[in-house]
Image (cartoon, helix red, strand yellow):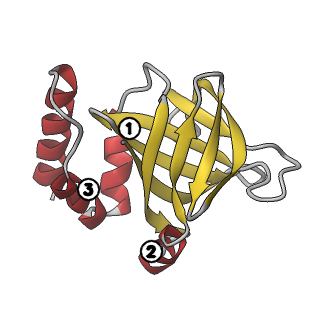
Amino acid sequence: MKLVILSFSIALTTSMASASPPCTADDIRSLRRMTACEWETLFRNGKAECLPLGTHKGVILEAEGSRLKARLQGLVWKGKDFDGNGTMINRWTGFRAVTAEVSHGTSWLDGQACIVLQYAQDAKIFPGVRDELRQIGPGLWLGRGYDGTKRTHTVDFILQTR
């Protein structure tokens, strides 16, 4: 399994350096089949050099330890739109709502650079939630969500440039 992670990570890192197209549906299927430990390894090896921009399709991999819960949440949550002025807004089926501030920051996982999406403490939905992103391939970001109050990891997700 470690060889699979290493091979996938090397392939994505190599493709990031070239002008190759965004990841394919096969890559997304491969990510869905991975374990939480494998996602963590990919996140640790990801990059946080530039902020995402534009519309990104979202896929929830696991929510609070459950892939079923992730699939159910994925029926509604469709991704995020980054406007380039330091904010983003979530896209759900039929509407957009719940903004967060976007900035470079330090990951709660490993103390290394990441992109931080910080929701307001007084937000009606996702109060105090913190998402962290790292780019793991061209047009492909791996995210980790945290309960901002308890600093506990609650969700893993993918964002893919559309």
Q: Give the image location of residue 81, x and y in percent.
A: 55, 40
The number of discs equals: 3
Instruction: Provide the secondary structure element on which disc 1 rests.
Output: helix
Task: Specify the amino acid type for callout 1.
Answer: Arg
Q: Does label 1 or label 3 sit earlier along the sequence?
A: 3
* 125 left or right, relative to 11: right
Residue positioned 63% across, 52% down in the render: 146
Which quadrant holds residue 142? top left
Instruction: Provide the secondary structure element on which disc 3 rests.
Output: helix
What is the number of the mark on residue 71?
Answer: 2
Q: Does label 2 or label 1 sit earlier along the sequence?
A: 1
Residue positioned 83% across, 51% down in the render: 123
Disc 3 crowd rating (10 Å Cα; few below 14, some 14-19, many 20+) is some
For label 3, the residue is 28
Q: Compare residues 11 and 28 and report the one nearer the observer.
A: 28
Task: Specify the amino acid type for callout 2.
Answer: Arg
Seen in the picture, residue 62 relative to 3 is either above or below; the reply is below
Seen in the picture, residue 44 relative to 98 is either above or below; the reply is above
Task: Specify the amino acid type for callout 3.
Answer: Ile
Picture quarter with the N terminus: bottom left
Which quadrant holds residue 100? top right
